[in-house]
Image (cartoon, rainbow, N blue to C red):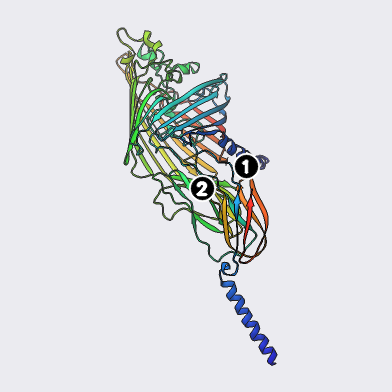
Amino acid sequence: MKVLPALSVCLLACTVRGFDADDFLERLDSTLTLSAFHDVLRARLSGTVDLEAYHFQQPAPGLIDSKIDNLFNPRLTLFLDAQAGPQIYFFAQSRLDRGFDPSARGAQVRLDEYALRFTPWDDRRFNLQIGKFATVVGNWVKRHLSWENPFINAPLVYENITPISDKAAPASPLDFVREFEPADKYQFNPVIWGPSYASGISISGRLDKFDYAAEMKNSALSSRPESWSLTEVGFDHPTFSGRLGFRPNEAWSFGVSASDGAYFRAEAESTLPRGRDIGDYRELVLGQDISFAWHHLQFWAEFYEARFEVPRVGNAGTFAYYLEAKYKFTPQLFGALRWNEQLFGDVPDGAGGHISWGRDLGRIDAALGYRFTPHTQLKLQYSFQQETTGQKDDNHLVAAQFTIRF
Amino acid sequence: MGYHLIFIITMRRLAGFTTVAALLPISVLAQATVEGRVGLAKSHPAPVVAQRYEIVTRGGVLSTQPPLAVVYLDGSFRKPSSQPTKQIAQRDLAFVPPLLPVQVGTRVEFPNLDDTYHSIFSYSPAKRFDLGRYRPEERPIPSEVFNIPGLVTLRCDIHEHMRGLILVLDTRYFVVTEADGRFRLSGLPFGRYTLKAWVDSKTTREQPVELKSGVTSHVDFP
């Protein structure tokens, strides 16, 4: 009974103190914006501080890497946005945290994104971008950062580990479908690893109600963060991805995406069948996305079909989708719901039969968020995940994330 | 009896005159003017539009919004029976005008003149609201009534760089300075008042002023 009043007092204190801090952050924003040559060259440094806490069952769900049930995951993210005249735009994102995905490891600093964009015409018909940046596939990338994402984690398709491994080819069909140890989780891959900040080049543009984007990257959508860097993986086996979008009006947006690329890392070469190389085994992803927004309601959905060419097995297909809605109840309070599901196809078992190569599962995510000020936000999330085939394990996750944006 | 009748008639005429006077625009009765110059806040560079994940965006070059001040005659004056509706538009990913003073009780519309969604909100204590996402052709034009004096900071939930200000005042006598800080405030009632210059959220300067009918006073806020 005493918890609610205490929580209310804490929230009130946060709000009152928040307005003091807000004024400071507003002045900091002005201080961190620089310009030269009569505003032709401008740069702004901004960022977020995220304090995340997770409580979950073992094995840890998604891409969380922790052997204990509670995890504290602080993160500092710095952004640099620079504009040189109307044609040149540069951005970079650097993070100090405990790993690209929530983990119990020590601190590390990474340069996650950097890109230079050239926009020759004002009507936005064509943009050329080069660097290391998020994929053009789908519609989740635009809201994947902590401030914009109504949830704390990513949709299932971006973080559910599958039996696909980019580090070693399976020795047999049964080796492919065997259960992997939770400790070995990072040897395997999801269909799309997060926002896939791989390196490469892209073109994009808008033509009336249509928009397009195409990219050539050094790694496949399922590739791990280490593979996104050019120093790790070159362009010997590039991945090609694209998206075509149709926006009949500002409320609706529809898109179709496709991606094709080799998914094995170089160290897997020795495990491949004799006479085959990395380029022979590809990840093909076909996606559809839809979004709708009207007043205080936003809705998004993505549907993905993926096919991996697996040595000694054949083609392994999976289908994943999610439906996500966010609603602002008041100017500061919002709620969000997301239903995710991933279904796995069958592969030959090597004995004349077929076997499912993964456990089908569904997950529901529910989140509440409160913005104390334009610079501070608290999110609470509960997720329930259940396997619908195999051992039918389930998992509960509770998470909180406090974000300061500057 | 006759004097009593004359007194009643005189009082009725006076009452009638008072009623007519009350209906006249105050500017007809008060012609005091004050002009001068305000030392403005330091100019900020134009913001940078974050367009990291917007594959298709406009050029991203925004014009510099020069610092402006609002000069107003402090006091609680009679509210007009109806107040004109004001507008702050969103055009080229910026609020236009960037600073709008209004009297308490004024309705402000927020028309979207861009070809993209905007989502205007404010967490300011003087007015907390969120209009949600709305299209350029949204009708009726989303609006809010500002009933509490104070500073309201406008933002857009989609375009992080956008900032606009509404200064809600008790008084009906106010003016926005020119870009060089000069101002002229006319049609003022005569008498002794405090003239204030709002410069930014932390700075409001003030000067006592005695306004005389038909006289232009000069007040600077260095």
How many neighbours does mark 2 have within 10 angstroms: few (below 14), some (14-19), or many (20 or more)? some
**Residue B160: percent from left, percent from top:** 49, 39
A299 lies above or below B146: above
Marks 1 and 2, how far apart at CA: 21 Å
Q: Residue furthest bottom?
A: B1
Question: What residue sits right under mark 2 in the picture?
Answer: B98
Compared with A267, A54 (above or below) is below
Q: Is residue A330 visible to the viewer in this orientation of the structure?
A: no
Amino acid at pointer 2 = Pro
Q: Quadrant of residue B191?
A: bottom right
Marks 1 and 2 share the same chain? no
Q: Chain of mark 1?
A: A
What residue lies at 55% left-to-right and 48% top-to-bottom? B180
Q: Which residue is mark 1?
A: A19
Instruction: Identify residue type, mark 1.
Output: Phe
In this image, A7 relative to A318: left or right? right
Which tag is nearer the camera, tag 1 or tag 2? 2
Q: Is residue A261 left or right of residue A99?
A: left
Q: Classify mark 1: helix, strand or loop.
A: helix
